[in-house]
Image: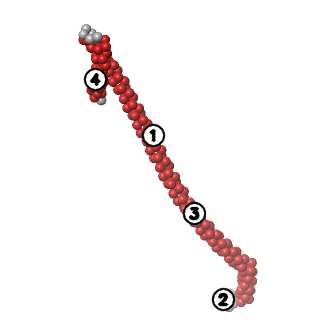
Amino acid sequence: MEQLGLNIHNIIVQIFGFLVVFLILRKFLFIPLRKISEDRSREIASQLSAIEAQRQEVEALKKDLEARLQVINEERKEILAKEREKALQSAQELLDEARREAERIREKAKKDMELEREKMLLSMREMIAELVVTATEKAIRSTLDEAKQRELLSKLIEEIENEGGTQIRKGIS
């Protein structure tokens, strides 16, 4: 071997040196690195499980919030429906009140028209009576005395009121 340029003594020393360096590296480098690597793996696994737990918690919160949002939406719809119904009811009440007011105004106008009609009839009767009295006075003045004139006028007014008033009412109506 010496011919190859290999010295056994150097080879043994180098093997022994390699084993010593290997054992030293193993004790001070490989074992601590493996421990650090295992600790890091456990820490990563712990963090992953914590992240999974947080994800599940977030998912649960999301479902809870969605349920609350659904409840809030339903409440909003109910409130809107109630408010619409109140608005419709208020509008109906206002409409009913307006109808009642219009009916009241119509009835008042009808009564006022009836009162004016009665006033007009009374005025026409008085005017007709005066005309009849004047015409009768002129026609009868020379032939009748005062008592007969009064009796004749009373009968005439009575007839006018009975027959003429009915005709006047028909004409106005």
**Quarter-wise, where is residue 112 in the image?**
top left
Tag nearer the camera, 3 or 2: 3
- Residue 4's label in the rendered image is 2
Which residue corresponds to the image point at 40% horizontal and 34% vertical from the top-left? 107
Numbered disc 1: secondary structure: helix
Three-letter amino acid code of the residue under disc 1 = Glu
Determine the CA span between mark 1 and mark 4.
48 Å
Cβ atoms at labels 3 and 1 below 8 Å apart: no
Nearer-the-camera pick, 95 or 7 = 95
How far across and down, in percent of the image, does residue 39 sit?
69, 74
Depth check, front residue: 95 or 143: 143
Q: Answer with left or right where residue 92 lies relative to residue 166.
A: right
Q: Which-is-in-front pick, marks 3 and 1?
A: 1
Residue designated by label 4: 159
Asked if labels 2 and 1 touch by Cβ distance under 8 angstroms, the answer is no
Position in image of residue 142 (x %, y %): 25, 8
Q: Badge 3, how many Cα within 10 Å: few under 14, some, many 20+?
A: few
Residue where numbered disc 3 is placed: 64
Looking at the image, residue 90 sits to the left or right of residue 158; the answer is: right
Q: Amino acid at mark 2?
A: Leu
Point out the image quarter for the C terminus.
Answer: top left
The residue that appears at 43% across and 42% down in the rendered structure is: 96
Q: Are marks 4 and 3 in contact (CB under 8 Å)?
A: no
Distance Cα–Cα, label 3 vs label 2: 81 Å
User: Label 1 belongs to which residue?
Assistant: 97
Residue 152 is drawn in which quadrant?
Answer: top left
